[in-house]
Amino acid sequence: MSIRKILFLLVVVTLAVISAVDKAAAQSAVPDEVLNRVVAQEQALTKELAQYTPLVETYLQNLEPNEDLGTIPRSDNYFLGKVNLANGVSRNSFFSERGLTQSLLSGLHSVKYVPEGFAQMIIMDTSRFDRDHYGFEYIRRECLGEVRCIVFDVTPKVANMSGAFLGRIWVEDQDYHVVRFNGTYTNPGSSKVYFHFDSWRQEMGPHHWLPSYVYSEDSNRPHIPTSKGLHFKAQTRIWGYGPRHLGSENEFTSLTVDSGAVVDHGDVVEESSPVLSQRAWDREAEQNVLQRLEKAGLLAPQGAVDKVLETVVNNLAAANELAIEPDVHCRILLTSPLESFTVGHTIIVSRGLIDVLPDEASLAMILAHELGHIASGHRLDSKYGFSDRMVFEDFEAFHNVFIKRDDREEKQADQKGIEFLRNSPYKDHLASAALFLRALSERSKRLPNLLNGTMGNRLAAKGETLRMPELMQAAPTLELNRIDQIAALPLGARVRVDPWNNTIELMKTKPVHLISAGEKLQFEIAPIHLYLTRQNDEAKTAGKNQ
Ligand SMILES: [Zn+2]
C-alpha cells in the first residue's frame, strides 16, 4: 500500500472518529429529562385536543406528468368538516360527500381517500407516544422561523406496531412542544395505505401550540403494484379552535339602561316609510346570515383585508358615480374553493380566490361582478330576516343558507360589471383579468372541486368560463410554458389565517425569480414552510381577553 493511500485512510478514519465523538457529545447534550418532557407535552396535547371542534379542510390534487411543467393536476378532491377530536377523529361534513370521495381508479385497483385519514395527521400517535414504544435519536439544532428547535429522528421500538409514527420531529427549546413532524405511519400487514406528511403546529397563546397545517404528498407506491399511477399532493388546514364572540360583546357592554327616563325626541320623525322598513328588514337578514357564517367559522372576522377589497370597490363606485346605500362592505370566506357572492350589500370573496388572483385588476373584475348584483337590486332572500332560520348546526350552513343566483341575474351582473370596469381606473389593465378567466376555464375540467363554490356560483366549468365570457375574449393566448406569463398564483400565495381566532392578514412575501415554468404552480398546492413565531406573552394575553 502506498504511503499516500495509508495517509488517506488515516484521514478517513480520523474523520469517522471525530464525527462519532461529535454525535455522542450531541447525544449527551440532550439529557433524558428533555425527552421525558417532549413525551409529556405530546401526551398533554393529545388530551387537550379533545376539547376542540375545529374546522378541517383538505384539498387534494391528483397529478400527471407534463412535458413542459413537470406535473399538472389531473383531478381534485375537496373535504370540509367540523372535527371532534375527543374520541380519535370523528367529523361532521359540510357536504354530502358521495360525490366528493371519488375513488381514484388506477388499473384494477381503486384507492379511496378517507377525509379522517388527513385529519389524523395532526397527531403522531394518540395512545402510544412514550419512550417504551419509541426510540429518539438526536440529529441537530435548527431554527424554524424565529423558533429554535432540537431535531430528533423517531422510530417505533416495538416490532409490528401498526399505525405507528416513523419520521422526524422538531421540538422547540423552551417548553419542548413538538412544533413540526414529518414522516409516515407504519402499517405492517395492513391493506391501509398511509401517506407521507409534513405536519405543523403554531403557538396560539403563550406556550400553547396547536396543529394548524398538514402537507401530504405521495407517488408511485411500489407495494400496490396496480396503483402505480397514484400521484397526488394535498393540503389540510385546521382553524376555528378559539371561542367566537362575533365582536358583539363590546356593543353589549356599552348598552346602558336609563331607568325611567322619558326621552323627548321633539320633532324627530320616528316612523319608517315602507321603503325604509323594507331596507331595514333586508339589512337584518344580511346581518343574520353574516353573523351565522362567522359563528360557524366560515367567515373571517372583520379586518384589514376587507378594507383592501373595499378600496377597490370604492374605486369602481366612484368612477361610475354609484351612490349605493347602505355602503357596500367586503368580507372573506375562509375556505379554499374559488368563489365570490353577495349577501345583501356585502361582497364575500373566498380566501382561495384571493390567493390565486394575479393582480388588482383581476380582483376588480371579481368585485365588479358582485357590485353588478348589488346595483341591479338582486336581493338576499328576505326569509333570513327571521332569526329562527339561523338555528342550525355549523356543518349544516351550506344547506340552510342559499345564495346562488340564476342565469338571468348572473348575466345582468356580468353586463353591469363589465360596464363598471370599462369606466374605471382598471380599464387599461383588463388583459390580466381576461387572462385569469382564460386560465380558469382551461383548468376547470381538471379542477372541478376547486371551482365548485360552497355557496356562490361557479366561475368556470367544463372548459368554459361562466364569469364575464365577453371579457375573456380580449385575453392574450394562454402560454403555460412561458415563465413570465403569470395568469394565476398558487393556492396559499396571499392570505394567512390565524387558526385560533380566524383573523386573516395578507402575507409579506418577497417576489421570487422563477427558474422554470413548472414553478408557476397556477391554482396548485405547494408545500408550506411556516415561519414560526413565538407569541409575546403580554400582547397575546391582552388580545385573547378582548
Ligand atoms: Zn354572480
Image (cartoon, helix red, strand yellow):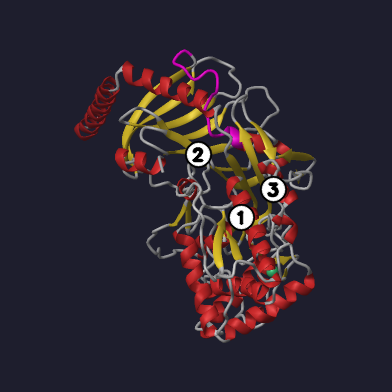
The residue shown at (69%, 75%) is 413
- Say which residue label 2 marks: 242
Seen from the viewer's position, the closer of residues 136 and 178 is 178
Where, quadrant-wise, is the N terminus in this rendering? Answer: top left
Magenta span: predominant SS is loop
Distance of label 1 from label 3 (alpha carbons): 10 Å
- Say which residue label 3 marks: 390
Q: Is residue 329 visible?
A: yes
Distance of label 2 from label 3 (alpha carbons): 21 Å
Magenta-span inclusion, residue 126: yes
Q: Residue furthest top?
A: 132
Distance of label 1 from label 2 (alpha carbons): 19 Å
Q: What amino acid type should be assigned to the residue bearing mark 2?
A: Gly
Read off the magenta span.
119-132
The residue shown at (50%, 83%) is 425
Asked which quadrant contains residue 175, the reply is: top left
Badge 2 vs badge 3, beta-carbon distance below 8 Å: no
- Please state the horizontal and vertical placement of residue 511, each as a whole percent of the image: 39, 64
